[in-house]
Amino acid sequence: MLTPAEASTAIGAALVPLPVETLALDAATGRILAETVVAERDLPPFDRVAMDGIAIRHAGWVAGIRRFIVDGVVGAGSEPPPLTADDHCLEVMTGAMLPPGANSVIPVELLRLADGHALLGNEVLTAGANVHHQATDGRAGEIALPRGTRLRGPELAVAASVGRRTVEVARAPGIAIISTGDELVGPDAVLKPWQIRRSNAQGIAALLRSRGHHNLRDAHIGDQRETLHQQIGQLLESQDVLILSGGVSAGRFDHVPSVLVQLGVRQVFHKVAQRPGKPLWFGVGPKGQSVFALPGNPVSTLVCLVRYVLPALEQLGGAAGSRTAGAVLETGWTGHATLTTFVPVMRTASGSPTVRLHQTRGSGDFISLVDTEGFVELAPGTTLPPGSPVPFYTW
């Protein structure tokens, strides 16, 4: 069996990139850049006034001038007149272009305006004070946003500032969430003693939406081979990613792996040396579709989704790379001899990196996940003392 690290590498190597599309900035929130955005001019493009006040020549201040003749007012978005002499000044507003001939700004809080003059005290003033100098943040032609950047508010503001109305991003994948099993019924059904309500699909969909994936399709398929073949085949034709739960172990009715292979899905791996989630299956469809068949027990389903599927979707979206958060164990841990163990955790305090292990009573005990913040990955064959750093994955 593969280790979790080997499984992640195998998934990443097998993913087929999604096509690129062009979106307007207001439609690109949360998407990932599939191109490099460069600055059209220096940032800032001119020496920019950083505080309301007066613009002066620092040499006049050094010469002892503390009373300056105010020649006018310069607001943001207007062309400033030049500063004419050491004992003159221009009243300037934040965001305005620094007037030619001026090199420093004295904040309004440090002066008094009266009778057309600005009167100052003896505060220390350095040359260039309160000026955001041209090209401090970047030069024309330099990269403003690298490929693989997630477009949030700050990034979209940068794109707009360099004259971009549209950006190229990977197309949002169509994702089918497929629950398998004759025992599953909907939330409104009258339960028979041998039935359970279908909950995995709801948990999967919620986690996907929380990561910005909204092009979702829900399906429930029974355990009959013919039905699985027909309905999974239809979803393969229309979707980019299939996420199945159930039917991947070694039981008589676990038809999912063989059905997928019959449909032309190339198996990349089946089973990972981990607990929970050992029967995890991954393959690539005839058209490059990514197919994840997760174990049906709900803890296994959610752990495998977060550990493998969500990072794969990030890569499909064009992300430059995802980082695993770190946590510190409150107590010690002795690992399984051969299996990596995933254990849900709770933080010991708000914002603290220290986490408390919150073990479930098995991979079907998803009630124990309530109020946990995620899970840690604990390597096999190791004994970890309290305070040990470990990989941490958030729900």
Image (spheres, rainbow, N blue to C red):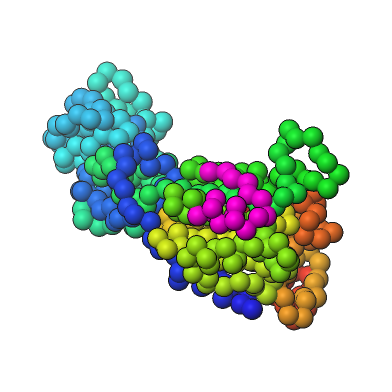
Q: Quadrant of the N terminus?
A: bottom right
Q: Position of residue 368 (x, y in %)?
A: 80, 52
Residue at left 30%, top 55%? 35
Can residue 118 be seen?
Answer: yes
- Stretch of the chain drawn in magenta: 217-233
Quarter of the image holding residue 122? top left
Q: Is residue 283 above or below residue 24?
A: below
Quarter of the image holding residue 362? bottom right
Residue at left 28%, top 42%? 166
Q: Position of residue 18 (x, y in %)?
A: 38, 56
Q: How many marks?
A: 0
Nearer to us in this view, 374 or 10: 10
| Membership of 269 in magenta stretch | no
Quarter of the image holding residue 316? bottom left
Residue at left 20%, top 25%? 72
Q: Is residue 318 above or below residue 209?
A: below
> Furthest-top residue in view?
115
Q: Position of residue 322 (x, y in %)?
A: 50, 61
Nearer to us in this view, 368 or 285: 285
Residue at left 80%, top 72%? 333
Can residue 105 be seen?
Answer: no
| Membership of 224 in magenta stretch | yes
Please give left or right for residue 229 compared with residue 249 in the image: left
Please give left or right for residue 304 compared with residue 288 in the image: right
Q: Is residue 227 above or below residue 270?
A: above
Q: Position of residue 112 (x, y in %)?
A: 36, 26
